[in-house]
Every structure is written in C-alpha cells, then in structure tokens.
C-alpha cells in the first residue's frame, strides 16, 4: 500500500495543467505555447497513470492510454513545429499575435 | 380522373415545366419561352375547371386530399404522436385566389416573353417554381405545409428580383428577403407554438380546438400569437411602417415579376390574416379590430398622400398598393360579412388591377426606358391604345363603378361604416386622394404635350394584347357582375364569421 | 500518514516539477525555459515510477525529456534570431486569465479533495512492461496500429510542411 | 314601359361598336351614335307617354349578395324618371347630330362618339336607377364621361388640368354622397328609394341622422351641379368641345345633382335643416356665379357661370320645397341652355375657334340662323315673358316666396337681374356692332347638321314652358306630384306682383345691358372704372381657385411631404437604426474574430471556467 494519497498526484497534475494553460494562453512566443501545451498533456498523463493505480478498477489500461497520448503528443509537437517553421518562413515572426490570417 | 388528385396536379403541374426546361438548351430562347408559358396553362385550366365545377354545384370538399406525411413523438412513449399530414384542400375563398394566381401567373409568363431579356431558361424555371409555391400556399390545409410553400415563394422571388431586375436589383432583392425572412420567422414561431400546444397544425382542427372553451392556450397567449401573425403577415401585406422593402421591389423588379408580386404575393398577407388570424383567433381579432382599422386607415391615407408626390410612376403604383391594402385591412377590421367580403374582393380586384398596371408600365418602360411621369408626358399621341388602357387601369384603381375596384372599396367601407363610422369617414379622404394621385400620374403621363420625342415608340401589339385585354375584361366583369366572386365566397365566409359570432 | 521515503520522494519530485513549470513561465530566455521544462519532465517520470509505471516513466524520459525537448530546441534555434521573449501580452488579460484559472483550479480541486476511493491492491509493478505489451498487442492492437499510422502521417506532414519550397520556386 | 331598361343600352351598344371598329368607320361613326340615340329618344318618348296613363313601373334583380344582404339593381319609371329620360335622350340625340358637323375633320372623330356614347349610356342609366347605389354607380360613370370629354383635346395643358380638376372636385362631392348613402343604408337596410322613404316616413331614422345623410347626399349634388363651393370646375370644363359643354355641362350631367335632390326629395323634406342648407347654398350660388358672369369675356365661360347660377336657382327652388319649380326649371333650362351652348358653338365654329367675345361683334348679319336662335335662348334665360324661362323662373320665385325666405328671395331677384344683364351683354357684344376680330371673310353659317338641333331646341325653348303655366294650367306640376302628395302641390301660388317684379328685373337687366353694349350710351368703362377693385375681383372669380390652390392643395401637398418626411426619416430611420444595430453587432463580432488564436482559446477557456465554477458552487457533481 502506498502512503501517498491519490489526491496528491491529482493535485500535482492540476497545478501543472494550470501552469501549462496559463502559459499557453499568455505567452507570445509560439514555441513556448507549444511547450506549454506539452506540459498540459503531461499533466493529463499523470492523471491517467494515477487512476490506473488508484482508480476504482485499477488496470494497465491507463498506462497504455498514456503511451498513446504520448505518441499523439509527440506527433503534435513535430507537426506543430513544422507548421511554425513554415509560418516563420513566410512571416518572419514567431509571435502568436501576429499570426492573424484567420481574421475576418 | 380522381377528384382528389386534381389539387395535387394543379399545384405541382408547374414543376413538370421545370423538368422539361431542364432539357432545353440555354440558348433556345423561343423554346424556353414557349415551355414557360405552356406549363402555366394546366394550372389555369384546372383551376377554372374547379371553378366551373363549383358553379355547377359540386362540393369543393370533394377535392381535398390527405396523406400522412411526417410523424414523430418525444422520447417518452406515452407522449402523444405529433403528426403532420400532407393536406391540400380548397374552399370558395381559396378557390378564388387559386384562380387569380393561375390567371395572373399565365399572364405574367406572357408578359415575361416580352420583358425578360436574358437567361430565359433560368427565369422560367424559377418562375414555375414560384407558381407552385403560390398555388400551394393557397391550397395548403396545414400550417406546416403552408409555411413550406410560403418559403418556396420567397426564394425564387429573391432570385427573380436579384437577377432580372433593374439597377438596384440586388439591394431590392436583399431587402425583400430580409423583411420577408423576418416575417416568416415570426410565422414559424407562431406555428410551432400552436403545434406544440395543440399537437396539430391542421387549420380546421386548430380552429375547433381554439374555439373549444377548454382549449390548452391561454387568452393572453392567443392575443400574442395573433399580434405576431399580424406582424408576420403585415410585413407581407405590407402594413405601413413595414413597407419599405416593397417599394424597392416594385421599382426594381422586372415588370413580369412585379405583376406576380403585387398581384399575388402581397395577397398572401391578406389571405393569412383572414384565414389564420381571423379564422383561428376570432375573439382576439375582435379585440384588435379597432387597432387594425386604424392601421388600415393609416395605410390608406399614408399610401395615398405619398403616392401623390412621387415622380416615378412605379413608386406611385407601389404606394397605391399600400393604400389599397389599407382598404383590405379596413374591411377585415369591420368584422362583419360586408367588410370581410369587401376585403376579399379588394384582394382579388387589386391583384388584377395592379397586374394590369404593372404590365402597362413594363410596356412603357420597354419602349421609352423611363417610368418617370415627367418624362412620359403626352404619350396618348404616340401610343393611344396603351394610354387608353392605362387610363382604364387607373380608373379601376381609383374605384370607378363598373370596375372591380369600386365593388370592393364600396363593401369594405360599407362594412366599416357599420362598426366604426368615424374611422371610415376619415378613410374616405383616401378615396379623394386616390383619385387625385391616380389622375395626376396617369394624366401626367398620357395627356399634355409630349416633352420629348421618343424614337421607336410603338403602340401595343401582338402578344401584349392578351394580358391587357384579359385583365381589363376580368376587371369589368367583376365590376358589373360581382356575384361571380361573391357566390363562391358565401359559404367560406360563413365558416370564418361563425367564430365572430355574427 | 507516515513520513515514508515514498512520500518524501513524491514531495520532492512534485516540488521540482512545479518549480520547473513556474520557471518555464517566468524565465526570460527561451533556452532557459526549455531547461526548466526538462526538470519538469524528468520529475514527472519519477512520479510515474512512484505510480508503478516503470515503462511509462522510461518512455517519458525518452520522448519528452529527449525527443520533444530537442525538437523544441531546434524550433527555437531555427526560428529565433533574438532571444528575449519580449513584452508579453496585455496585463488585464493576464489577470483575468489568472482569476479564471484559479477559479477553475478551485472547482477541480473540490473534486480532488473529495476523491475518496478505497485503494485496491494492484499488481501493476510486477512485469510492468510485459503487462503493457500484452495489453497493447491484444486488446489495443487496433488503436496501436492507428497510432503508428498517425505517427507516419505526422512524420510525412512535418517533412512536407517544414521542407523549403525554394526548389519549386527555382523550377518555375 | 317594361322595356325602358333598353333605353340606356342603345348608347352602350354604340359605345362598344365604336370602341371596337370606330377607327375603321371614321366619320361614319357619327351615324352609329346618332342612330342609337335616336332609338333611345323614340323609346323615351314612348315611355313618357305611357307614363302619362300608367302607374309607376319598376323591376329589379339581385346584383350582389353579402350574407343576408341582397343588393339589387333594376330600373324604375316614375314621373321624374320618365321626364328625365326624355330630356336626356333628346338633348343627347341633338348633340350627337350637332357634333357631326362640329367635330368634322377631327382626327379622333370616332373617339369623340365613343365617349359620347359612354356618357349617354351612363346618364340614361342614372335617371332610371331605382336605388341609391345604382345611382351612385352611374353618377360616377357620367363623371367619367364628362372627364373624358373635357380632356378630349388631351394635348392641351388646360384641357388636362380642367379634366383633372373636374374629376377630383366632383369626387369630393361624391364622397359625401358615398358616405351619406352608406349611412342611410345602415339606417334603413336598403338602397331602394322606396324603402328609404318608407323607413324615413315611418320614423325609423332619427332626425339628426336624416339631416346628416341628407346634407351628405346634398354634398354629392353640390359637386356634380357645380354649386358653391365646389363650382370652379364647371367653368374650367369649357375646355372640352362645345357640344360636350351643351350636353354635359349644361343640360344633363350637371343637372344630375338637382335630379338627385329631387329624386330623394321625401328624405330632404323630412329635415328642415337640410332644406334650408340647400336653399341657402342654391341662392348664394345663383347670385355668386351670376356676378362673376357679368365680367367674363370668354363666351363659353359666361355661359358656364350662367349654368352654375341657374343650377343654383334650381337648388334654391328645391330648398324652398318647390319640387315642381325645381324640376320644371331643370327641364326648361336644359332646352335653352343647350340651345345657347350649341349656338355659341356655332359662333365659335363660324369665327374659327376664337372664344373671346371682345374679338367678335356684328355677327348678326353673317349668321342669319344662329343669331336669332341665340337671341331666343337669351330671352328665355333672362326670363322675358312668354318664353319658357319666364314660367319656370316665375315658378321658382313663387315657391321661394311660399317657402318664406325673404332675403333669399331678394337674392334670387337680383340674380335674375344679373342674368338678364350678362346674357344681353353677351348677345350685344357678339352679334351687334362691328366685327373686332381678324379674317371677317371666313365667317360662315354652320352646316345643316348643326343648325337643325338648334332649331329644335329653339322651338322647345319657346314653347317648353307652356306645359306648366299659371295661365293655362300646371299640367307638368300636377303630373309630377301625382300620387305623392308629400311632394307639395303641382303649382306654387305666388302673388301677382312677383311675376311683375321678375319681369321688371329681367327687363331692367336687359335694358341696362342694351344701354352699355347695344346703344353704347353709357361707357363700357363705367362699371369697371367705378368699381375697379370689384371688377378685378369678379374678373378673377373671387379668387376662389387661388384660394383653393393656397389652402386645400397646399395642405394636401403639405401632408404628403409630412408623410414623406415620416416615411423617409422615421420609418427608414427606424429601419436604418435596426440595421445599424445589427451591423454594429456584426462588426463587433467581426472584431472579436481577430485571428488571435490565443484570444479565442482564452475566451473559450474562460467560458468553460465560469461554467465549471458555477457548477461547482451550485453543488453540481458533489450532490
């Protein structure tokens, strides 16, 4: 039995998620925004793993899911950066507030 | 042929024309026109056939048709089933409007042969769709079906105005769509509330349910629904502050479309108010009668006074339509048989008269490229026949006895004089103003010295005579023998007025 | 609650992860931020071990601390001639967002606070990798294949996107 | 009499035929029109004679059904109708004949006959109508005929304006009739004259209602008969061809107002106020129009004001309860005024279209036939003894004396003086002295088709009065009131001095005119010099037209512009407001669509956060 309560891990995940969220919504540098999103993904992964151990029906599924999420996250990071590169080539900027091609 | 299928054939026969047109090459101008005109004829013949059947003593109820169509219910199995049936039917009032529609549509198609200068294929396809919509509106026995047909009339009209109109056609088309969309949105809300509260959209059933003392709708809700209907159909009619879209349409749309628009589409407003407003909510209608009468007098006077100072003949006609619709409202507000019959007469008579006037305007515009009164002075010299018919139409419009306008005006006023004499007396100023503006416009265009030389101006000829003569003859026929209209109306009016208790 | 090594370890790891996150937000230089991020990722891997997920922890170190961080560094290097992250976005937005996030956190924390599920003895830590392998190749075989397809698509997509279009320009 | 309904149909047939093939017939159209009206005339004479010996005949059928209300149409031949049928068909036949010569050479010759046919049909229909609604229908149709014929020379701006004015001014009156008719209907539940009288006599209608409806109906008559204040269209209507003036604006249509009052006389009798109103308006119009007629220089306008004045006389007679006097004068007036107009037309024809009497003169020698006929008409209208006008005018004055309005009686006498004066002024200026126009050589007598109707009318203008005289018996009067004692006696008994006074006044007027214009012993400037301002006022017709222009026309224009202001600024403004609000909202929305992905995310998240917090605080998932 573990001496650490599940809530502690969940709280950690929450804090990390909030930090990531704040970063994603306030930072101007697109790279940092992407990093923040990775952070949020990680926070979610912590939750998944926590529930895989402390959940109502503990099972390995949570960990498998974490792996999938990681795969997706990695893919996302790669594609995101590729898009960033492409944008940067065209607009010479990485500032997210200057990327307003969707305007109007 | 089975009597029950006649109405469906009548309503959907123009669609066959669309199918045929689809196979006609775009450039084949003559064929497009021919097909377009030809496929308005089945509806015309069928509607006339029904009319003569009726005169021969057949029961109109034999023509009604019902098929189950849509059914649904909530998640809970115990909830009642909501069903919408495909129901077409016809009574005397609807019959007259169907005949009017068929006649004006055919004549407008003939007019289009002359007035439409491009893309005949598209024009006639939209036009036939529009005709189906109009016929459907007047035969639907079910609010949902009515609404669908109502919307079917909107879309083709939008394109017909927007594509084949004059200089500001896009603007006119958009304001047409916006106002009417607004109106039909309100209409839809009313229909949905009625549907949800009563579980049916059949007009007869609704009338019975609402008339039943234990009906599920509270009095204030009914009043609200009626006011909403008044606004929804008031946009269409149009009632005075809601009219500005209609001016633009009348000025910008091509003449053949205005014939339809002014002749029939506006009448949907009056039809709706009489059939649904007065038919379903008689009690509440009674409460609003004075308001409606005031609105009617407002319409009559504002339209007449505004028509008096217009410089464009089309604008004069547009305001005159507003003015004449005021008479419809006044007749309705009278809430007695005389007034309501007058209102219906006015609906039909104005349909014919405005179709005639706009046809002539179209002819004049085609020849002279202008519809400004000032520019047209002295036309009687170059185009005596057109001028003569214009004068005849103007006389019909100002309510000269012996023509249809008088009978309707007379009855509407007579009805209102019984219930609200003072308001009616104020309204009579409108009669004088009508004479003033009609004469000012018509004489300004035809009499006097020709202000400028028109090159290539020639009088009415060929196919143009058909609409003009048919319309003039119908107008005179109704004026001289009003019973051609009043006898079919008799029983239809009885049912409406039963609810009014008198 | 006993002051066990497990508890201590988890506290330290959590603290490092949070500090890393906070530093991520507050450091000025982007490269420094990435370093802070590595701290966070590694300590999260530690947390995974505490949660009897050794394989996941290993993957975390490999993918996040390794691959993703490197990609990010490349991204920073390729895009950023200047280093400082400049004047950040509006003050008010930050404040409002902070309030919103705190509120959100509070609401979620209420749920966490009330999280009270009896612990069940698990066998996750025994042959963890084998369990995962069995699950993936039996129960989750189809999602797994999808993930491989996804990775392939991402790979190609990233190449296509990032590829310079100069050549096409030269041709024309 | 059963076939009296055919009488209006002949002109209708002529109208339809000429409308369809008039272009091909050209001037032969005249024969169609003349034949049709001649048949009508024959029928009318037959009906008139039958009516002497048979009772009133009427027939009707259902015209329009409104619920339980059955509105009927039909026809009726009573004394008044029969007489009117005769007058109308006679004058109209004569005018049809006359026009053949007068309109010769006009390119719209057949159109003229089309209009004449329409008018004759409507007028004959009007006089056999047994109910108010039908009367109203034909009432408007004669208005249409009049309008068309006034505007016959459509290319002339004056004709256009005159036609418009005629239509609109009579329409103002018609609306009165319209309202009165409907109000009366709801009171009596019928448009039938007989039913209305029954209801009125039975006291089913309240007194105020009777007065109100009677006055409203009288307003209709005022419009049609050119009574003050709706008189000014009638002189302007002289823009039409002269035969039209004779037919419509002298003999028939304008008399329709008088006819209407006569036809509804029992209704008017039931209200003292209404009668008094009629009498006052009639007497005032008589003297008012006569005074204007004193100074006009257009031959047709003088006659037009004379017509207005004479119509005022008739109204005055009816208003004084002199039913017979009014109808009698209506008849004699139809003869001599039509004669005068036709003669005037002949004069105009002779001098080549000129209508200014200052440019005529000395025509007596040239126009051997027209001159004496014009003199007969002048004598008749002036009330010189032994001609028809004398008897009818005398009848009116006697009725007025009986009716007991001494002031109005005096007015009528003065009007008689004026009448004699201006008519002789006209006669002397046109026919005596030297020719003052150009082109004297071209002056010629009119062709036979024009002189024949004048001769017929001339004879009638002399003998027409003998059907109802104080000396030989009042046949007409007795016949008219036969079977209806309420209409009053067949003959108004007045003291002998009235006859003498009337004769004196009219002879005085004639003599005075002779002094000035015939013998020229008094300078022509005597009047205009003395009463310079008065003369100007009269010449400008009391500035009534200008007054209307400045008030009614200006007011309705003003209202129109007010409405336009409302329409453009308020309604459109409101619409603009609504659209701009919606557009503003749209713009706001577009602004929010800044393309800032981050902002989108922030807003979306904040929304979520708010929801979650609310959810948490309300206890959502904790429950």
Image: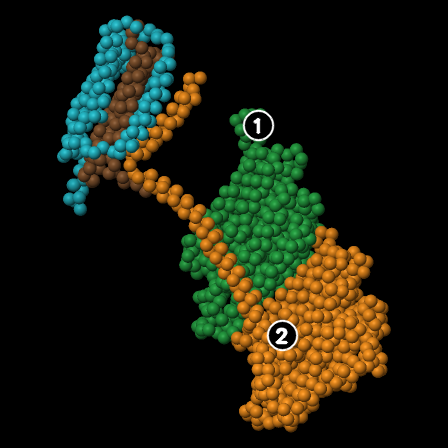
Chain colours: A brown, B green, C cyan, D orange
Image coordinates for residue D494, horizontal then vertical, percent:
81, 77
Q: Residue at x 81, y 60 (%)?
A: D201
Mark nearest the camera among 2 and 1 is 2
B34 on left or right of A32: right
* Figure quadrant of residue B286: top right
Mark 1 belongs to chain:
B
- The residue drawn where x is 74% and y is 75% is D409
Quarter of the image where one finds residue D395:
bottom right
Residue D438 shown left or right of residue A40 in the figure: right
* Residue B277 in sight here: yes
Q: Is residue B218 left or right of residue D401?
A: left
Distance (Cα) linking label 2 and label 1: 77 Å
Residue corresponding to mark 1? B79
Towards the viewer: D475 or D1:
D475
As drawn, A20 above or below D54 = above
- Image quadrant in which you'd find residue C145: top left
Between D467 and B498, the one lying in front of the other is D467
The residue that mark 2 highlights is: D234
Which mark is drawn over residue D467?
none
Q: In the depicted view, which residue is nearer to us: B146 or D239?
A: D239
Q: Position of residue D539 (x, y in %)?
A: 58, 80
Mark 1 neighbour density, 10 Å: few (under 14) some (14–19) many (20 or more) = few
Q: Position of residue B41 (x, y in %)?
A: 56, 55
């Amino acid at each position: 039995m573990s001496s650490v309560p599940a809530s502690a891990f969940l709280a950690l995940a929450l804090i990390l998620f909030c930090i990531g969220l704040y970063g994603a919504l306030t930072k101007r540098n697109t790279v940092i925004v992407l990093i923040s999103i990775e952070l949020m993904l990680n926070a979610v992964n912590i939750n998944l793993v926590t529930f895989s151990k402390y959940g109502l029906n503990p099972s390995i599924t949570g960990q498998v899911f974490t792996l999938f999420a990681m795969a997706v996250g990695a893919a996302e990071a790669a594609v995101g950066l590729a898009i960033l590169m492409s944008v940067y080539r065209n607009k010479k900027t990485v500032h997210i507030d200057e990327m307003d091609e969707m305007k109007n | 042929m089975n009597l029950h299928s006649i109405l469906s054939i009548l309503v959907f026969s123009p669609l066959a024309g669309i199918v045929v047109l689809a196979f006609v090459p775009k450039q084949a101008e003559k064929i497009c026109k021919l097909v377009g005109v030809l496929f308005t004829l089945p509806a015309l013949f069928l509607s006339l056939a029904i009319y003569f059947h009726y005169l021969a003593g057949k029961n109109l109820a034999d023509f009604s048709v019902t098929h189950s169509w849509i059914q649904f219910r909530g998640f809970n199995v115990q909830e009642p089933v909501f069903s919408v049936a495909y129901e077409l039917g016809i009574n005397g009032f609807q019959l007259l409007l169907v005949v009017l529609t068929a006649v004006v549509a055919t004549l407008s198609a003939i007019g289009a042969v002359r007035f439409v200068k491009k893309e005949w294929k598209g024009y006639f396809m939209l036009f036939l769709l529009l005709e189906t919509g109009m016929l459907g509106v007047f035969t639907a026995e079910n609010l949902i079906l009515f609404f669908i047909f109502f919307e079917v009339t909107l879309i083709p009209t939008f394109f017909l105005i927007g594509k084949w109109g004059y200089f500001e056609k896009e603007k006119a088309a958009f304001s047409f769509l916006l106002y009417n969309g607004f109106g039909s949105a309100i209409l839809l809300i009313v229909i949905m509330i009625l549907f949800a509260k009563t579980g049916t959209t059949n007009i007869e059933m609704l009338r019975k349910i609402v008339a039943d003392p234990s009906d599920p709708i509270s009095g204030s809700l009914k009043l609200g629904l009626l006011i909403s209907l008044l606004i929804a159909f008031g946009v269409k009619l149009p009632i005075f502050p809601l009219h500005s879209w209609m001016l633009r349409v009348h000025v910008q749309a091509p003449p053949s479309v205005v014939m339809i628009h002014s002749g029939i589409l506006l009448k949907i407003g009056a039809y709706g108010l009489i059939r649904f407003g007065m038919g379903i909510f008689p009690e509440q209608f009674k409460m609003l009668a004075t308001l409606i009468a005031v609105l009617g007098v407002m319409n009559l006077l504002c339209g007449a006074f505004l028509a008096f100072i217009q410089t464009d003949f089309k604008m004069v006609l547009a305001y005159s339509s507003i003015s004449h619709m005021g008479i419809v409202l006044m007749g309705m507000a009278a809430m007695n048989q005389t007034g309501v019959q007058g209102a219906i007469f006015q609906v039909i008579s104005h349909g014919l008269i405005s179709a005639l006037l706009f046809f002539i305007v179209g002819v004049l515009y085609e020849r002279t490229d202008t519809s400004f009164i000032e520019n047209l002075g002295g036309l009687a010299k170059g185009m005596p026949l057109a001028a003569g018919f214009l004068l005849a139409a103007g006389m019909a419009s100002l309510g000269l006895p012996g023509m249809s306008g008088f009978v309707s005006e007379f009855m509407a006023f007579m009805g209102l004089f019984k219930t609200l004499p003072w308001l009616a007396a104020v309204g009579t100023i409108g009669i004088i103003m009508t004479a003033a503006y009609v004469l000012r416009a018509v004489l300004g265009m035809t009499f006097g010295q020709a202000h400028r030389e028109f090159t290539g101006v020639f009088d009415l000829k060929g196919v143009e005579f058909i609409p003009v003569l048919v319309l003039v003859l119908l107008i005179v026929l109704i004026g001289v023998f009003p019973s051609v209209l009043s006898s079919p109306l008799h029983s239809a009016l009885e049912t409406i007025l039963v609810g009014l208790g008198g | 609650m006993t002051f066990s090594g497990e508890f201590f370890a988890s506290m330290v790891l959590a603290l490092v992860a949070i500090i890393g996150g906070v530093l991520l937000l507050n450091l000025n230089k982007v490269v420094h931020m990435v370093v802070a991020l590595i701290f966070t990722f590694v300590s999260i891997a530690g947390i995974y071990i505490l949660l009897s997920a050794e394989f996941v922890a290993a993957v975390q170190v490999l993918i996040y601390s390794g691959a993703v961080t490197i990609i990010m560094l490349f991204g920073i290097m390729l895009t950023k001639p200047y280093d400082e992250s400049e004047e950040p976005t509006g003050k008010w937005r930050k404040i409002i967002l902070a309030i919103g996030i705190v509120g959100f956190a509070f609401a979620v924390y209420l749920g966490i606070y009330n999280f009270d599920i009896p612990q069940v003895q698990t066998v996750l830590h025994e042959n963890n990798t084998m369990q995962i392998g069995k699950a993936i190749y039996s129960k989750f075989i189809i999602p797994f294949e999808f993930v491989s397809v996804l990775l392939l698509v991402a790979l190609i997509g990233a190449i296509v996107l990032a590829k310079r279009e100069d050549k096409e320009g030269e041709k024309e | 009499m059963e076939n009296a309904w055919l009488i209006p149909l002949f002109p209708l047939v002529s109208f339809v035929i000429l409308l369809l093939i008039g272009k091909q017939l050209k001037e032969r159209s005249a024969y169609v029109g003349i034949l049709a009206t001649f048949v009508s005339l024959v029928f009318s004479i037959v009906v008139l004679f039958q009516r002497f010996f048979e009772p009133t005949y009427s027939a009707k059928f259902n015209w329009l059904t409104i619920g339980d209300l059955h509105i009927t149409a039909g026809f009726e031949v009573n004394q008044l109708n029969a007489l009117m049928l005769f007058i109308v068909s006679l004058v109209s036949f004569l005018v049809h004949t006359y026009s053949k010569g007068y309109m010769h050479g006009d390119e719209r010759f057949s159109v003229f006959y089309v209009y004449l046919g329409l008018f004759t049909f409507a007028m004959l229909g009007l006089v056999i109508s047994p109910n108010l609604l039908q009367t109203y229908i034909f009432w408007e149709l004669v208005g249409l005929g009049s309008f068309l014929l006034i505007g016959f020379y459509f290319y002339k701006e004056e004709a256009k304006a005159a036609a418009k004015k005629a239509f609109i001014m009579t329409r103002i009156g018609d609306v009165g009739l319209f309202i009165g008719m409907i109000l009366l209907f709801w009171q009596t539940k019928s448009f039938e004259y007989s039913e209305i009288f029954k209801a009125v006599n039975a006291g089913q209608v309240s007194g105020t209602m009777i007065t109100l409806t009677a006055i409203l109906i009288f307003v209709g008559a005022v419009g049609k008969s050119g009574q003050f204040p709706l008189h000014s269209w009638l002189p302007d209507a002289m823009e039409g061809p002269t035969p039209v003036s004779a037919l419509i604006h002298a003999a028939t249509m304008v008399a329709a107002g008088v006819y209407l009052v006569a036809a509804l006389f029992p209704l008017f009798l039931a209200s003292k106020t209404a009668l008094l109103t009629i009498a006052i308006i009639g007497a005032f119009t008589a003297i008012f129009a006569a005074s204007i007629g004193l100074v006009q220089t257009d031959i047709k306008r003088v006659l037009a004001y004379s017509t207005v004045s004479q119509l005022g006389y008739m109204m005055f007679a009816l208003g004084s309860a002199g039913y017979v006097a009014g109808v009698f004068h209506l008849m004699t007036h139809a003869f001599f005024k039509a004669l005068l107009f036709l003669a005037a037309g002949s004069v105009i024809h002779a001098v080549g279209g000129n209508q200014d009497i200052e440019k005529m003169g000395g025509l007596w020698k040239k126009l051997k036939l027209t001159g004496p006929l014009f003199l007969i008409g002048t004598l008749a209208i002036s009330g010189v003894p032994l001609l028809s006008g004398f008897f009818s005018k005398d009848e009116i004055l006697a009725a007025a004396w009986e009716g007991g309005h001494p002031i109005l009686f005096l007015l009528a006498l003065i009007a008689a003086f004026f009448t004699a004066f201006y008519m002789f002024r006209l006669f002397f200026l046109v026919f005596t002295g030297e020719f003052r126009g150009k082109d004297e050589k071209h002056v010629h007598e009119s062709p036979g088709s024009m002189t024949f109707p004048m001769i017929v009318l001339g004879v009638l203008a002399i003998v027409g009065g003998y059907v109802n005289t104080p000396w030989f018996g009042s046949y007409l009067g007795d016949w008219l009131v036969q079977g209806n004692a309420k209409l009053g006696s067949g003959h108004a008994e007045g003291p002998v001095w009235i006859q003498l006074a009337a004769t004196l006044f009219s002879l005085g007027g004639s003599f005075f005119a002779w002094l000035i214009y015939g013998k020229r012993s008094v300078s022509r400037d005597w009047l205009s010099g003395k009463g310079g301002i008065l003369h100007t006022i009269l010449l400008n017709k009391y500035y009534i037209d200008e007054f209307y222009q400045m008030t009614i026309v200006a007011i309705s224009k003003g209202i129109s512009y007010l409405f336009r202001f409302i329409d453009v600024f308020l309604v459109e403004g409101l619409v603009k407001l609504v659209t701009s609000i919606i557009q503003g909202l749209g713009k706001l929305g577009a602004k929010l669509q800044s393309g800032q992905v981050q902002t989108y995310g922030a807003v979306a998240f904040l929304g979520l956060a708010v929801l979650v917090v609310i959810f948490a605080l309300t206890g959502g998932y904790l429950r």
